[in-house]
Image: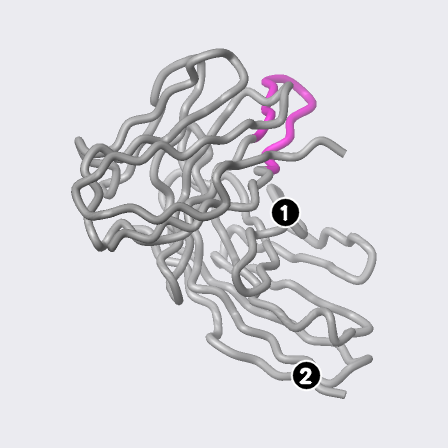
Amino acid sequence: EPEVTQTPSHQVTQMGQEVILRCVPISNHLYFYWYRQILGQKVEFLVSFYNNEISEKSEIFDDQFSVERPDGSNFTLKIRSTKLEDSAMYFCASSERSDGRDFTYEQYFGPGTRLTVT
Amino acid sequence: GQNIDQPTEMTATEGAIVQINCTYQTSGFNGLFWYQQHAGEAPTFLSYNVLDGLEEKGRFSSFLSRSKGYSYLLLKELQMKDSASYLCAALSGGYNKLIFGAGTRLAVHP
């Protein structure tokens, strides 16, 4: 069964450093998302990406964050200058939605990258 | 604003039935999802409702009332492995972002 994959599973970085989190969505999916979950808190939406551009972003997704789909398969989240409060699990998700009579909204989540900022 | 409410914790006995309720207030509502999440792992899709009514998938069923802003997840024939957090999430907006509740931690006892 196809699945979303993410690398690395765990990333430790120092405050102020740049990190890139990588995701490979399910191959025929059209919509891509990043979410984060701070330890003990709820899952929060960061950004959605469709047709090679950001379609929606939350207040969390400020100028320090960026996303890219550089080669048609990978989907990356970059944090330019990490802060302590960026420590969290970051989940990538993808979904396939078609207009018309048949549609699916299911979002499939990758296993996550645990980011620890020291 | 966007608001999803669900109980923080519930306990149940192996073999029993449990119902986890969720109320929501979100703009651009497109549907209601339920995910299971074990500690340290990713959310796993369980069920979703776009229209009012009951959706059944094996031991799991989910119900939605759009007019009341209410959903529930029903788990039957509980097993110890069902001990997990259950996340209620509203599908919202034109690009279908998920707005999550804080989750309900379910503990299943023998």
The earlier-in-sequence mark between 1 and 2 is 2
Q: Position of residue B26 (x, y in %)?
A: 38, 48
The residue indicated by pointer 2 is B12
Q: In the picture shown, does residue A13 fall above or below B74?
A: above
SS label for mark 1: strand
Amino acid, disc 1 = Tyr
Pointer 1 chain: B
SS label for mark 2: strand
Which corner quadrant holds the N terminus of chain A?
top right
The residue indicated by pointer 1 is B48
Residue at left offset 78%, top offset 74%: B79
The CA distance from mark 1 to mark 2 is 23 Å
Mark 2 residue crowding within 10 angstroms, few (<14) / some (14–19) / many (20+): some
Pointer 2 chain: B
The region drawn magenta spans A95-106
Q: Position of residue A108 (x, y in %)?
A: 60, 39
Viewer-side label of 1, 2: 2
Mark 1 residue crowding within 10 angstroms, few (<14) / some (14–19) / many (20+): many
Q: Is residue B61 magenta?
A: no
Label ID, residue A34: none
Image quarter of residue B95: top left
Image quarter of residue A118: bottom left
Along the viewing direction, whichever of A2 and A53 lies nearer the viewer:
A2
Along the viewing direction, whichever of B20 and B10 lies nearer the viewer:
B10
Q: In the picture shown, does residue B108 fall above or below A80?
A: below
Residue at left offset 44%, top offset 53%: B100
- Are the numbered discs 1 and 2 placed on the same chain, yes or no? yes
Q: Position of residue A59 (x, y in %)?
A: 22, 41
Prevailing secondary structure of the magenta residues: loop
